Amino acid sequence: MTGVHVAGSPVVSVIVPAYNAAEFLESAIERLLGQTIDDFEIIVVDDGSTDTTPTIGTRAASAHADVRFFRQEQNGGVARARARAVAESRGEFLWFVDCDDDWADSALEKLVAAARSTGADVIVCGAAYVYPGQRRPLLAPLLNDPITGAEAFVLLLDGELTGHLWNKLFRRSLMREIEFTPTRVHSDLAMVAQLLAAADHVASISDSLYSYVVRGGSIIRSGSRRAESLLLVEQAVTSAAITLDTRIIGSNSFGYFRLRYVLLSGLKDALTGPYDAEERDEIVSELRSRLTWRLVSLAARRRDWKRLALAGTAKLSIPLHRRVLRLAAEQGTA
């Protein structure tokens, strides 16, 4: 999938979706402008904000030639905002960031250097989750040499390569191969799965270049209804697997993915989300019917004791599973 850089176009387009992000957007743009390479553009797409985000974006684009601002009149979700930004982008590579996060000033320089030296379509770097009073490293998989996109896809299924967009640089030509799955949660995962499946080669660097700031009101930590989104993510990852090799669907790696992201995430959502009793019972019943002992055993094979406890109790008893969920939440591991 290796592309050719077109003279006059930027090397990288930095994609910044923004929805009611007035508190963070101006600072994010200023920090991005401080990157240690020169040849890049910043594309901000306002997703129908009701605060002063459009004013800030318009002002930044007027003040800086490397900043381009686009507004969507109605809120359509982060996936649609990213799709618009990609359609407007001109760079050889794309880097997706969230404006309330942080990153190293040298991030683009190091990511592009790795892409140039390896010829890979996707570069993965180290990162960190930042909680109040706590910083937890997120290590990139240690790859001595570039691997195929198919091999990287299996690492994603196994949980050894994360489904985050922000710790990866992508060749823009890959975007022709994907759909922007319109989900409220895990939209990153749906995109990453498709992009890895489309890539010829994937490489990694150990440098920690991105800090994902976990805030109390984020969608993924809130009690929003996620059932429909989880189904769409499952469909996107399944379609990506089929494009690579239909045998992946029956593999232990794909089963482990389904256990984590579809069944256990779905059960947690059903039991803690804002559903009425009938909806909750229907979702729980359907997910438990798909939770086989074979899938439960996959957590044991990987010594994933937390998910083994969650999966085993979900299979045996929902009241017991609720207690394990509550305990995991109290310990901050749910």
Image (cartoon, helix red, strand yellow):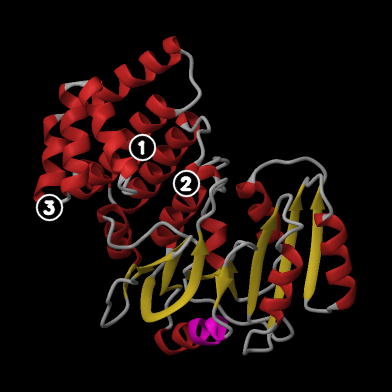
Give the magenta range.
Answer: 106-112
Query: Which label was assigned to residue 303?
Result: 3
The secondary element bearing badge 3 is classed as loop
List x then y, in percent, for residue 299: 16, 45
Q: Residues within 10 Å of mark 2 (few under 14, many from 20)?
A: many
Q: Is residue 163 above or below residue 80?
A: below
Task: Give me the C-alpha separation between circle 1 and circle 2.
Answer: 11 Å
Q: Which residue is mark 1?
A: 265
Which residue is pictured at 48% across the width and 60% down the height? Answer: 132
Dot 3 and dot 1 residues touching (CB under 8 Å): no
List x then y, in percent, for residue 76: 69, 41
Q: Position of 110 compared to 71: left or right?
A: left
Q: Which kind of residue does numbered mark 1 sit on?
A: Ser
List x then y, in percent, for residue 77: 65, 43
For marks 1 and 2 on the same chain, the one whose residue lies earlier in the sequence? 2
Q: Which kind of residue does numbered mark 3 sit on?
A: Arg
Q: Main secondary structure of the magenta part?
A: helix
Does the segment drawn in magenta span residue 109? yes
| Image quarter in which the C terminus is found | top left
Q: Which kind of residue does numbered mark 2 sit on?
A: His
For marks 2 and 3 on the same chain, the one whose residue lies earlier in the sequence? 2
Q: Residues within 10 Å of mark 3 (few under 14, many from 20)?
A: few
Frontmost of labels 1 and 2 is 1
The secondary element bearing badge 2 is classed as loop
List x then y, in percent, for residue 203: 37, 76
Dot 1 and dot 2 residues touching (CB under 8 Å): yes
Q: Which residue is mark 2?
A: 186
